[in-house]
Amino acid sequence: MPFHLLFRNLTGHWLRSLLTILSVAVAVFLICVLHAVVTGLSRTVETASSNRLLVQSAVSLYVDLPLAYQQKLASVPGVEAICKWQWFGGRYEQDKGGFFAQFGIDPDTFAKSYPEITVTEGSYEEFQKTRTACIVGADLASKYGWKIGQTVPILGTIYQRTDGQPWQFLVAGIYESSTPTIDQQTLYFQFEYLRESLETGGAQGPDGIGVYMLKVAEGHDPVEVQRASDALFENGPQRVQTTTEAEFNRQFVTMLGDVPTLMQMVGSAVLFAIFFAVLNTMIMAGRERTKDIGILKALGFTDATTALLLIGESLLLCALGAALGAGLGVALEPAFQATVSAMMPGFGFDKDTLLLGTGLALAIGLVSGVVPGIRAARLTTVAALKEIG
């Protein structure tokens, strides 16, 4: 097959070819984004630890549990460590439009319960020693330019200081995470700082704990620990619901709605539209080349060769578009991750995602080229010359 004719045919109508390539590129890029969203949500569930359980109110995640529950949960056989997680919900004073997560935790049990977190700058020991200290994710620190030793003012929304001033958190460490389950855009501070402020009247807000994290000791069955924890408060004063970390993450994801189905619907619509766009381009190209096809056959080219020329042209259009779309996805991946990693730490354009987008584009190219290709194969030299007058 004369491959040089493929490129010559593309440049024959360069504007139409360019627009088709750009259309395919946009479609591939969108498909990669949609697939990355779905896989990112899945990774937060699939990579969850098997030895961590989350205890929350059986009524709702928004109902706090009493502080006294911690001591009772510690008595459950198989519980190695407990770490409180309390949502703070403040806003960075110097960026009131910005939002990121803040949690009050127990520094003594947090590090041993989450070995996936590593403090790469600063000192975790300093975080433990200083009551007003915090550790922040690497992405969050990079976003705002925070450095070790810097004081971060956070305006309270749920917990407000009685003097009307923002909370002051000293950056003692910057952490990185090795798992999609834990993002790098969160600020963790000592829960005791919050509790003491509430008890001394320095701040006002709800009492209690949103979630207790239980680390299950090696050799113990997490299911048994889960059942024992639920049974401990079966008769109140407030019933609890204990779930695995994977199930907890799954419930959190479902709060966003049926995202996978929505993404599939959008992706299908994109594929449907781009298929007809490429098909229309190739049908037009096939009709315009009727004379060329007649001449090629007169020169001895076979029916298969003339058909493969159009199929190859369609595949080349889609291949160029797929390469451009996949390259755009790789180039913009850091920007997307910085934007959505707080909700989807596992978001990323991995090899499978890029291959999916490229494979679908090539499939569209193949199918779109078949229709004009069959016509070209069936067209005789006489018919071709007669059709063009």
Image (cartoon, helix red, strand yellow):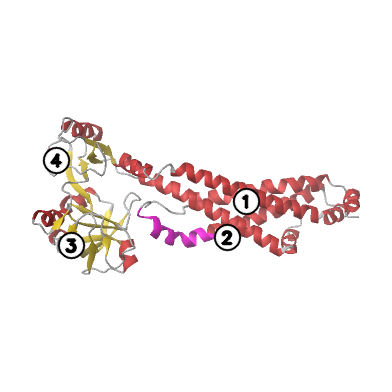
Contact between marks 4 and 2 (CB within 8 A): the answer is no
Find the magenta span and give its range.
327-342
Quadrant where the C terminus sits is bottom right
Residue at image point 47% right, 54% down: 349
Mark closest to the chain's N terminus, 3 or 1: 3
Q: Which residue lies at the image location 71% right of the left edge and 51% below the top edge? A: 280
Q: CA distance from mark 4 to mark 2?
A: 56 Å
Q: Which numbered tag is attached to residue 69?
A: 4
Q: Using the rendered image of the protein, determine whether residue 362 is visible from the camera's viewpoint.
A: no
Three-letter residue code for mark 1 = Ile
Residue 41: x %, y % from top left = 40, 46
The mark nearer the N terminus, 2 or 1, is 1
Q: Which secondary structure dominates the residues rendered in magenta?
A: helix
Where in the figure is residue 215, as x and y percent of width and height?
A: 21, 42
Residue of label 2: 324
Could you say which is closer to the camera, residue 383 or residue 207?
207
- Label 2 to label 3: alpha-carbon separation: 46 Å
- What residue would you read off at disc 1? 274
145 versus 318 height, above or below: below
**Earlier residue among tags 4 and 2:** 4
